Amino acid sequence: MSARHTLERGALAAAGGLLACFLAAPIVALFVETSRGELRAGLAHPLVWPALRLSLLTTTVSAAVVVALGTPLAWSLARSRGRLASVVEAVVQLPIVVPPAAAGIAMLLAVGRRGLFAGWLYPDGWSVTFSTPAVVVAEVFVSAPFFVQAAVAAFRRVDPELFVVARALGAGPLSVFARVAVPLAAPGLFAGAAMSWARALGELGATLTFAGNLQGVTQTLPLAIYAALEADLRAAQALSIVLVVVAFSLLGVVHLATRRVGAPR
């Protein structure tokens, strides 16, 4: 290898390393600047465990909803090439670029007590807003695009000839989807589900606007950090560490599962 090639590779690695260091620095500071005593004191704060339990509950439910409904949607989009499919795909990706606070206001105007669909959804006057189900609704809205986008890409990477062969052997559309497409696209689906779950775990703006910040009812980990930051920095640090550890652990487990599913047999 020539000296020029070595220099160019080193320059590329250095440029990438700068970004990696920038992204890692806040996480490292979070752990380094928090002593064990401060962590124990923070974990003893009454906000911590109710928020953690609620976050795990709501993100698990939202992830299940996203995967259950997003997988068929992604399959349909991956198999379609028309203008309508392009429009639907763009609409599905829109929550990624909409500010979370604006997303919360939009959900209030759509499914709030006086929203566009209130008369149909709430004939008896009850509203999903400012309740635990509202947290799930907000998390589904902001996290679904990450799963659908990854799932569409995963389905499109599968050789379409395999679907033709399955249909020729007598498999119906549902069998092709469930027994051929999903298993072959599983690594991408796992990765998309992880990204969606992680996005739901870190959601704050839409949840705060649409569901409020009620301890034990709608106060998830990010909202508890937001509340604790005004009164107890130790609790905010402890909650932040818990959030990072939970998210990193999930991503690690999903990464290992993805590698196993995608490994050659």
Image (cartoon, rainbow, N blue to C red):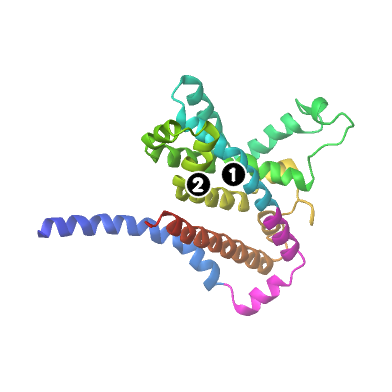
The residue under label 2 is: 189
Q: Is residue 96 left or right of residue 111?
A: left
Q: Is residue 53 covered in magenta?
A: yes
Mark 2 neighbour density, 10 Å: few (under 14) some (14–19) many (20 or more) = many
Q: Nearer the viewer, residue 157 or 32?
A: 157
Farthest top residue? 83
Mark 1 and mark 2 in contact? Answer it, CB < 8 Å.
yes
Disc 1 is placed on an element classified as helix
Disc 2 is placed on an element classified as helix
Q: Which residues are magenta?
A: 34-57
Q: For residue 162, what is the image quadrant?
A: top left
Q: Residue at x 12, y 56 (%)?
A: 4
User: From mark 1 to mark 2, how far is it between C-alphas?
Assistant: 8 Å
Residue 130 horizontal/vertical position (percent): 79, 44
Q: Is residue 49 covered in magenta?
A: yes
Residue 42 horizontal/vertical position (percent): 69, 71
Q: Identify residue type, mark 1.
A: Val
**Looking at the rendered structure, which numbered label has been put on residue 67?**
1
> Is 72 drawn above or below residue 42 in the view shown?
above
Can residue 150 be spotted in the picture? Answer: no
Q: Nearer the viewer, residue 41 or 132?
A: 132
Mark 1 neighbour density, 10 Å: few (under 14) some (14–19) many (20 or more) = many
Farthest bottom residue? 37
Which quadrant of the figure contains the N terminus? bottom left
**Looking at the rendered structure, which numbered label has been put on residue 237?**
none
Q: Residue at x 74, y 43 (%)?
A: 134
